[in-house]
Amino acid sequence: TIKANTLLHSDGSTTTQPSIPALDQRMAKAWVNFNGTGTVAINDSYGVSSVTDAATGQYTINFTTSRPSANYAPTLATGTGQVFQFVVSITTNSYQVRTFNGSAYQDESTVASIVFGD
């Protein structure tokens, strides 16, 4: 186990965070947990700048930094378990998600999403 606040090169200059290439594709690139009812509000996130409320049960998740390609895999979860969730559009800047109760789009109080891959 190595614990350090700052890593240094052998010449004493600072270095960037170490990368573990074998794990890079398996690690989350972005994630968000937000309240999708009323005024949409992000509870917590990483790599997500905002969530846009497009309409009832329809949201756009916007990245802080564009992805290198649109070949990433977003996952979704809601707080109730009674609602279908799906992705309808993926771009390098954002992706759109929907929450649906079987007969109509429905806002959800807790929506969470994680992005893996490029």
Image (cartoon, rainbow, N blue to C red):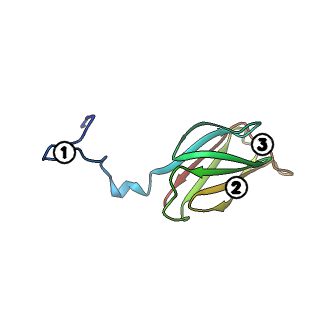
Rendered image: mark on residue 86: 2
Provide residue 62's location: percent of width, then percent of height. Answer: 60, 51
What amino acid is labelled 1 in the image?
Answer: Ser
Q: Secondary structure at mark 2?
A: strand
Q: Which badge, 1 or 2, is on the more N-terminal residue?
A: 1
Mark nearer the viewer, 1 or 2: 1
Report the Cα–Cα distance between label 3 and label 2.
Answer: 13 Å
Q: Residue at x 68, y 55 (%)?
A: 96
Report the Cα–Cα distance between label 3 and label 1.
Answer: 50 Å
Where, quadrant-wise, is the N terminus in this rendering? Answer: top left
Decide if residue 37 is on the left or right side of residue 43: right
Decide if residue 27 is on the left or right side of residue 56: left
On screen, 41 above or below 117? above
Provide residue 103's location: percent of width, then percent of height. Answer: 86, 51
Q: Secondary structure at mark 3?
A: loop
Q: Secondary structure at mark 1?
A: loop
Q: Could you tell me if the residues under marks 3 and 1 are in contact, i.e. CB atoms within 8 Å?
A: no
Q: Which image quarter: residue 7?
A: top left
Q: Which badge, 3 or 2, is on the more N-terminal residue?
A: 2
Pointer 2: residues within 10 angstroms few (<14), some, or many (20+)?
Answer: some
Q: Which badge, 3 or 1, is on the more N-terminal residue?
A: 1
Provide residue 67's location: percent of width, then percent of height. Answer: 51, 59
What amino acid is labelled 2 in the image?
Answer: Phe
Q: On the image, numbered disc 1 is attached to which residue? A: 13
Furthest residue in direction right, as rendered: 103
Taking depth in this image into account, of 62 and 103 the one nearest to the observer is: 62
Decide if residue 96 is on the left or right side of residue 4: right
What amino acid is labelled 3 in the image?
Answer: Asp
Q: Residue at x 13, y 47 (%)?
A: 10
Q: Residue at x 50, y 53 (%)?
A: 65
Report the Cα–Cα distance between label 1 and label 2.
Answer: 47 Å
Q: On the image, numbered disc 3 is attached to which residue? A: 107
